[in-house]
Image: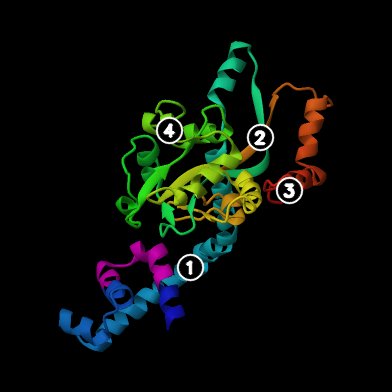
C-alpha cells in the first residue's frame, strides 16, 4: 500500500494539473489527506462507487501520460546523479568555509603585486578545554565570545554548569592560537580580548595553556578553568602533561559538536580548518618551493603530516 501511495503521489506531483478540478479534489483527499472512499462520498453527497470511478479515471489518465513521456522514470534515474552533485556541492561549501586567507599577508602581497596560492596540507582545528571534573561538556560560539570578549560570566552556573568559579585563560597575542581566536571570535581583529583576561590570565606557551587550566583546581577556592589551543598540539601536550600533573582535562564540544578526527575532517566541527603551504601563484613548476608543496600533499608527505601529530587530508 505504501509503494502504491508513493507511486500515485508521484503521478499527481508531475501530472496533477492535467486533471479536472473534481479529479484533483478526490485524488488529493484520498491519497494525500487519507480520507476513505466512504468519507469522500458522504462529504460530496455521491455514492462510494462514484468516488472510486473518478479516482480510477484520474489514475489512468496520469499513468497514460507517464507511459508516453516517461518523465517520472527519467526523474528517478537522475536521482543518484543529483545526490552526487549535492554531495560535491557540500564538499565545495566546506572547502569555501575553511578557506582562510590571512588579511595581513594578502595586503602585503597586494602591495607588491603578488597573487598568493593556498595549498591545504593538513586538517586542524581550534579547541577549547576545561577540567575533566567540570560537568559542562560544551559551549556555544556565542558563549565563548561572551567569556573572552565581554568577560560576561564568572561562574559556570551561568552557562548551565556547576556553582564554581569560571576562570578563562588566553594565549599570548603573538601565538598561533591567538590568531585562531582572532579569526573565529574577534572578527579578524575588529574585537579585542577582555582586558581583565589579558592582564592576568595569559598562558605563554602550549604546555602552560594546559597546566594553567589544570592548576585551577588547586586554587582556594578551587575553580574550573577554560583554555584553548589547536587540536594537534592539544593531543601532544596533553599526553606529555600527564607526567606533570594528575589533574585531567577534557575537550569541550562547540555548538553541540565534539572535536574528533572525524568531525574535523568532515567539517562538521565548527572551528575546523586547514593548515596551508602558501606560495606565489606564479611560483615556477620545478622550483624548490613548488616541489615541497607537491611533496606535502603526496602519500609520503601526508605520512610526515601524520607523524607530526596533524590530521592528514582525506583520500
Q: Is residue 259 above or below residue 108?
A: below
What residue would you read off at disc 1? Answer: 66
What residue would you read off at disc 2? Answer: 276
Secondary structure beneath dot 2 equals: strand
Q: Earlier in the sequence, mark 4 or mark 2?
A: 4
Q: Earlier in the sequence, mark 3 or mark 4?
A: 4
Residue at 27% in and 85% down? 37
Secondary structure beneath dot 4 equals: helix
What separation in Å lies between label 3 and label 1 (alpha carbons)? 55 Å
Q: Name the quadrant containing residue 6.
A: bottom left
Q: Nearer the viewer, mark 4 or mark 1?
A: 4
Q: Nearer the viewer, mark 4 or mark 2?
A: 4
Q: Is residue 91 above or below residue 34?
A: above
What residue would you read off at disc 3? Answer: 306
- The x and y percentages for residue 45 are 15, 82
Q: Earlier in the sequence, mark 2 or mark 1?
A: 1
Residue at 45% in and 52% down? 217
Secondary structure beneath dot 1 equals: helix
What residue would you read off at disc 4? Answer: 200
Q: Residues within 10 Å of mark 2 (few under 14, many from 20)?
A: some
Q: Earlier in the sequence, mark 2 or mark 3?
A: 2
Q: Residues within 10 Å of mark 3 (few under 14, many from 20)?
A: some
- The x and y percentages for residue 58 are 35, 74
Which segment did they paint magenta? 9-25
Q: Nearer the viewer, residue 21 or 189?
A: 189
Q: Nearer the viewer, residue 44 or 185?
A: 185
What separation in Å lies between label 4 and label 1 (alpha carbons)? 74 Å
Magenta region, mostly helix, strand or loop?
A: helix
Q: Are marks 2 and 1 in contact (CB under 8 Å)?
A: no
Q: Name the quadrant containing residue 84.
A: bottom right
Residue 186 visible, this angle: no
Amino acid at each position: 500500500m505504501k509503494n502504491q501511495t508513493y507511486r500515485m503521489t508521484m503521478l499527481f506531483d508531475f501530472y496533477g494539473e492535467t486533471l479536472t478540478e473534481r479529479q484533483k479534489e478526490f485524488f488529493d483527499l484520498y491519497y494525500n489527506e487519507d480520507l476513505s472512499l466512504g468519507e469522500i462520498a458522504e462529504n460530496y453527497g455521491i455514492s462510494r462507487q462514484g468516488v472510486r470511478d473518478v479516482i480510477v479515471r484520474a489514475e489512468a489518465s496520469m499513468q497514460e501520460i507517464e507511459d508516453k513521456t516517461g518523465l517520472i522514470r527519467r526523474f528517478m534515474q537522475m536521482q543518484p546523479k543529483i545526490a552526487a552533485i549535492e554531495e560535491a556541492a557540500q564538499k565545495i561549501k566546506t572547502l569555501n568555509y575553511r578557506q582562510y586567507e590571512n588579511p595581513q599577508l594578502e595586503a602585503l602581497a597586494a602591495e607588491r603585486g603578488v597573487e598568493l596560492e593556498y595549498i591545504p596540507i593538513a586538517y586542524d582545528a581550534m579547541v577549547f578545554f576545561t577540567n575533566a571534573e567540570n560537568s559542562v561538556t560544551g559551549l556555544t560560539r556565542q558563549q565563548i565570545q561572551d567569556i573572552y570578549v565581554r568577560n560576561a560570566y564568572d561562574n559556570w552556573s551561568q552557562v548551565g554548569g556547576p556553582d564554581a568559579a569560571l576562570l578563562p585563560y588566553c594565549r599570548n597575542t603573538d601565538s598561533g592560537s591567538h590568531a585562531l581566536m582572532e579569526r573565529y571570535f574577534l572578527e579578524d581583529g575588529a574585537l579585542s580580548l577582555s582586558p581583565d583576561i589579558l592582564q592576568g590570565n595569559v598562558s605563554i606557551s602550549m604546555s602552560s595553556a594546559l597546566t594553567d587550566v589544570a592548576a585551577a583546581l588547586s586554587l582556594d577556592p578551587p575553580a574550573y578553568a577554560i583554555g584553548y589551543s589547536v587540536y594537534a598540539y592539544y593531543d601532544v601536550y596533553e599526553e606529555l602533561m600527564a607526567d606533570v600533573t594528575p589533574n585531567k582535562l577534557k575537550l569541550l564540544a562547540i555548538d553541540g559538536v565534539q572535536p574528533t578526527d572525524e568531525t574535523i575532517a568532515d567539517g562538521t566541527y565548527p572551528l575546523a580548518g586547514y593548515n596551508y603551504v602558501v606560495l606565489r601563484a606564479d611560483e615556477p613548476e620545478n622550483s624548490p618551493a613548488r616541489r615541497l608543496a607537491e611533496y606535502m600533499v603526496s602519500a609520503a608527505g601526508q605520512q610526515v603530516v601524520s607523524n607530526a601529530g596533524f590530521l592528514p587530508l582525506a583520500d
